[in-house]
């Protein structure tokens, strides 16, 4: 399998001198198309920073990032914006939905920002909502939804422009177990549909569903485990736990 | 906020202070100079021969006349001073003070053989001073004195005692032969007048009535519309003319004061609203330690009322200090507009307005913040944005920058309304000032007209203040908006909007209300001006009005560009990492 994403010596530092913080410190990461990678590690080890660098939300201090065959670490702000718009989908721990927009308006927003016609954007959003099982909630406001439902809306939004890579930063960090399971299933569906995913998580259960598990400490990768077997097994076990 | 209220109260103070003084200098001058109640003039037929001053004696014996002076001879002449030549009407007077109309000498002495006394406003406009050598109809004189009278309208709207022309002659009209143009008034001895006269003389008599209020009735009763009959004028006519300017500037000032007041309310509301958002957490703390909602509102209110009192004090002082500058002595009167009084009433009104501003501007946010649940406040949950559904739907059809702009605007309808209101008020003010200026320009006025200049300066000051306040307001609103939408902005960028699109969007969000405000303001300004001045409404050139709207939009775009660009370039990652959306 070819690499959709690869980084070489990726570094991000904050401050300088005495107070220099190496949030990400020489990371080499390769993610193959269709692969789901989980990143785990203690708080402050640089997981979010890594995702932000890869997704073009933040700029690296050093190293290279290649996304879909293109070098992207030296792009202009404008080109980065285009990258976020077309190649990357984000899912955040705090959902970050716009409260004044309805569910479907939230989902269609990236398509509108990408210059799609309102009708095409609406059609795509409707389809995505069906995919995440919320087609009935299109006209509701996010505040009327449960946490798990909100995160599913956020996932639908991340898929709006058919990104080559979906980045999720602790997508279940604000959710209870039942909702976590919901979102987990959704990611699994995505995985089966061939979507490439990088998920940062504290949750062992989520990590267990990935193809690969990477452990981070102090800005660097310290361990890598290739997980095997169908994730359904884990899910089944999880569901059992729930019961 | 302090500044906004202070600026507004200053103008209000000016308006009110000037209110009281307009008529006073004229009345006091009239008493000092034993001003006539009725002036009677008889002029020679331009084609024909002399007139008989005895005609005027018929009037001096009329019912109701208690005293009189004259008839005095009047001649039109040319006055030369250095290389300047001006037309004058030369009034022949006794060297002794008369019973009615005793011009008050403000400099030098009263008339003597070979010595002329120059009317004060004319002297001021022409720079004539005591001791200056002048030539009248070819004969040499010296300026003996400068004096003030209320028997006629001072230069340049001089009451004509000889055939004269003021301003432009209407098309097709010819001036009478020998008529003088825009004359000033000088007093000479009777003999001197007779000597410089080149043709038949006019005569003027001044009458004192038992009751000055009867002047108009007396004039109506005795004016005969036939050649050779004397022309009568009541003192009120002079009064009207002299105080016309004061009434104009007073109107300008009070209207300007109100406009500034409204604008100040708008800016203050935004400022307070913004600060209140910062204070939400503090409110939460206050409530957490047991303050009741009422107490919280009271605390906030007290803080702002204190600021308002301070600001209005500053405004009163500033207004008191600037008022004399604006209402400097009206030339041609004595003791004139001098010190606009700072009456108790003025102080009360100004303070009340300032307090009103503060209370209004505080009440909404105070009540709201007091009502928010303590938990929300502690969590600093920002004011939830509003949803304006049709705006969202509409915006999805527009280019990205406009989409962002409409949605940003739609989140805070009240703030948008304030922006519109503020812009409407400013543009109204500017349009009204432009209309007033156009009117000033349209008047048949001489170049030496200091009064028009003064009014023009006044308009300029108010206009500049209005624009300055609006600019401050725009910047404040933009910052408030930028801070308010920082999460949404970061998210929008994360979803792929470029910095350029975002900063354009944030700018447009201000420019759109400005556009609406400008359009409303152009209409409002014309309405305002018509309301203030129903009789005479010369419109400013249409292209000015047309240029105003895009001009305003450009200005707002420029003002908002910096905050918007800064906001759009802020790194997005930290904002999105915050656990709270
Ligand atoms: N803007 C910043 N300025 C300075 N230091 C920062 C900044 N952002 C992050 N850091 C530091 O970089 C390091 C990595 O932060 P990061 O948020 O990536 O950690 P994380 O692994 O996501 O932690 P968590 O699990 O708590 O989300 C931390 O030590 C943090 O203090
Ligand atoms: Mg993190």
Image (spheres, rainbow, N blue to C red):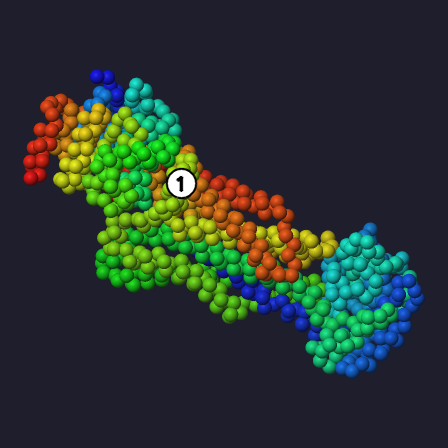
Residue at x 16% of width, y 33% of height: A185
Compare residues B180 and B110 and report the one nearer the observer: B180
Q: Position of residue B575 (x, y in %)?
A: 30, 39
Foreground residue among B154 and B366: B366
* Quadrant assignment for the N terminus of chain B: bottom left
> How far across and down, in percent of the image, does residue B31 sit?
70, 74
Q: Residue farthest to the right?
A: B49
Is residue A235 rendered to the left or right of residue B413? Answer: left
**Residue, x 68% and y 52% (percent of image)?**
B441
Is B431 placed left or right of A22 in the picture? right
Residue located at (36% from left, 62% from top): B302
- Return the x and y of residue B235 as percentages of the image width and height: 72, 72
Between B111 and B198, the one lying in front of the other is B198
Mark 1 lies on residue: B395
Q: Is mark 1 within 8 Å of ligand 1?
A: no
Query: In the rendered image, is residue A59 in sight?
Result: no
Task: Please tell me in which quadrant of the rendered image residue A2 appears.
Answer: top left
For numbered disc 1, what is the local secondary structure?
helix
Quadrant of the snapshot with the C terminus of chain B:
top left
Q: Nearer the viewer, residue B94 or B358?
A: B358
Is B142 left or right of B215, judged from the image as shown?
right
Few, some or many C-alpha atoms within 10 Å of disc 1 (few <14, some 14-19, many ≥20)? many
- Above or below A37: residue B486: below
> Is B89 placed above or below A82 here?
below
Which residue is at 9% across, 34% downward? A238
Q: Position of residue B497 (x, y in %)?
A: 37, 33
- Based on the displayed image, in which of its 4 quarters is residue B187 positioned? bottom right
- Mark 1 belongs to chain: B
Q: Residue furthest top?
A: A1
Vertical order, B402 against B220 (above or below):
above
Q: Is residue A72 visible?
A: yes
């Amino acid at each position: 399998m070819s690499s959709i994403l690869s980084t070489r010596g990726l570094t991000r530092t904050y401050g300088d001198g005495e107070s220099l913080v190496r949030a990400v410190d020489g990371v080499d990461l390769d993610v193959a198309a269709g692969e789901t990678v989980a990143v785990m590690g203690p708080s402050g080890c640089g997981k979010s920073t890594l995702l932000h660098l890869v997704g073009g939300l933040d700029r690296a201090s050093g190293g290279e990032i290649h996304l879909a065959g293109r070098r992207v670490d030296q792009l202009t702000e404008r080109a980065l914006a285009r990258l976020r718009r077309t190649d990357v989908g984000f899912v955040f721990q705090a959902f970050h939905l716009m409260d004044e927009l309805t569910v479907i308006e939230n989902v269609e927003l990236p398509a509108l920002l990408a210059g799609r016609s309102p009708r095409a954007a609406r059609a795509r959003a409707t389809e995505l909502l069906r995919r995440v099982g919320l087609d009935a909630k299109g006209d509701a406001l996010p505040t009327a939804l449960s946490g798990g439902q909100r995160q599913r809306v956020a996932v639908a939004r991340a898929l709006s422009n058919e990104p080559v890579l979906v980045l999720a930063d602790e997508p279940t960090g604000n959710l209870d177990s039942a909702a976590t399971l919901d979102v987990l299933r959704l990611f699994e569906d995505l995985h089966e549909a061939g979507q490439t995913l990088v998920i940062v998580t504290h949750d062992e259960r989520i990590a267990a569903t990935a193809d690969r598990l990477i452990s981070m400490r102090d800005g660097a990768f310290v361990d890598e485990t290739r997980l095997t077997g169908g994730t359904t097994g884990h899910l089944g076990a999880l569901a059992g736990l729930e019961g | 906020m302090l500044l906004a209220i202070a600026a507004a109260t200053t103008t209000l103070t000016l308006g009110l202070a000037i209110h009281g003084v307009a008529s006073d200098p004229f009345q006091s001058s009239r008493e000092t100079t034993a001003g006539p109640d009725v002036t009677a003039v008889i002029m020679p037929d331009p084609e024909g021969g002399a007139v008989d001053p005895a005609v005027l004696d018929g009037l001096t014996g009329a019912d109701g006349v208690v005293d009189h002076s004259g008839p005095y001879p009047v001649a039109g002449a040319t006055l030369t001073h250095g290389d300047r030549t001006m037309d004058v009407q030369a009034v022949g007077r006794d060297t002794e003070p008369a019973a009615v109309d005793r011009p008050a000498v403000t400099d030098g002495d009263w008339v003597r053989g070979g010595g002329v006394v120059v009317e004060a406003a004319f002297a001021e406009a022409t720079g004539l001073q005591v001791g200056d050598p002048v030539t009248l109809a070819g004969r040499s004189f010296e300026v003996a004195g400068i004096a003030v009278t209320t028997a006629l309208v001072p230069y340049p709207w001089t009451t004509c005692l000889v055939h004269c022309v003021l301003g432009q002659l209407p098309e097709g009209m010819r001036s009478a032969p020998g008529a003088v143009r825009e004359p000033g008034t000088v007093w000479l001895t009777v003999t001197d007048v007779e000597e410089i006269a080149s043709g038949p003389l006019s005569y003027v008599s001044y009458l004192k009535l038992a009751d000055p209020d009867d002047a108009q009735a007396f004039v109506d009763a005795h004016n005969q519309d036939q050649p050779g009959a004397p022309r009568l004028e009541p003192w009120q006519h002079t009064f009207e003319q002299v105080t016309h300017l004061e009434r104009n500037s007073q109107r300008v000032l009070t209207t300007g004061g109100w406009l500034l007041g409204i604008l100040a309310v708008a800016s203050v509301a935004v400022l307070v609203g913004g600060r209140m958002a910062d204070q939400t957490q503090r409110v939460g703390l206050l409530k957490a330690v047991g303050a009741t909602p009422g107490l919280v509102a009271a605390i906030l209110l007290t803080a702002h009322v204190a600021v308002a009192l301070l600001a209005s004090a500053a405004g009163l002082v500033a207004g008191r200090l600037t008022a004399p500058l604006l209402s400097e002595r009206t030339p041609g009167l004595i003791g004139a507009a001098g010190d606009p009084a700072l009456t108790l009433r003025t102080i009360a009104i100004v303070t009340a307005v300032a307090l009103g501003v503060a209370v209004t501007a505080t009440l909404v946010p105070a009540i709201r913040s007091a009502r928010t649940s303590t938990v929300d406040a502690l969590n600093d949950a920002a004011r939830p944005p509003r949803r304006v559904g049709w705006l969202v739907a509409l915006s999805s059809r527009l280019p990205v920058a406009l989409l962002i702009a409409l949605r940003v605007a739609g989140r805070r309808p009240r703030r948008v309304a304030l922006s519109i209101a503020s812009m409407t008020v400013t543009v109204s003010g500017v349009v009204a000032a432009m209309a007033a200026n156009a009117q000033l320009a349209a008047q048949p006025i001489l170049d030496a007209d200091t009064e028009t200049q003064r009014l023009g300066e006044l308009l300029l000051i108010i206009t500049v203040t209005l624009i300055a306040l609006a600019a401050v307001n725009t910047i404040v609103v933009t910052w408030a908006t930028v801070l308010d939408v920082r999460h949404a902005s970061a998210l929008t960028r994360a979803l792929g909007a470029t910095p350029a699109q975002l900063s354009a969007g944030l700018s447009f969000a201000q420019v759109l209300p400005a556009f609406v405000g400008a359009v409303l303001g152009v209409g409002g300004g014309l309405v305002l001006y018509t309301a203030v001045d129903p009789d005479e409404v010369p419109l400013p050139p249409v292209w000015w009005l047309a240029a105003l709207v895009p001009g305003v939009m450009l200005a707002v775009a420029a003002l908002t560009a910096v905050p918007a660009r800064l906001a759009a370039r802020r790194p997005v990652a930290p904002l999105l990492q915050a656990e709270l959306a």
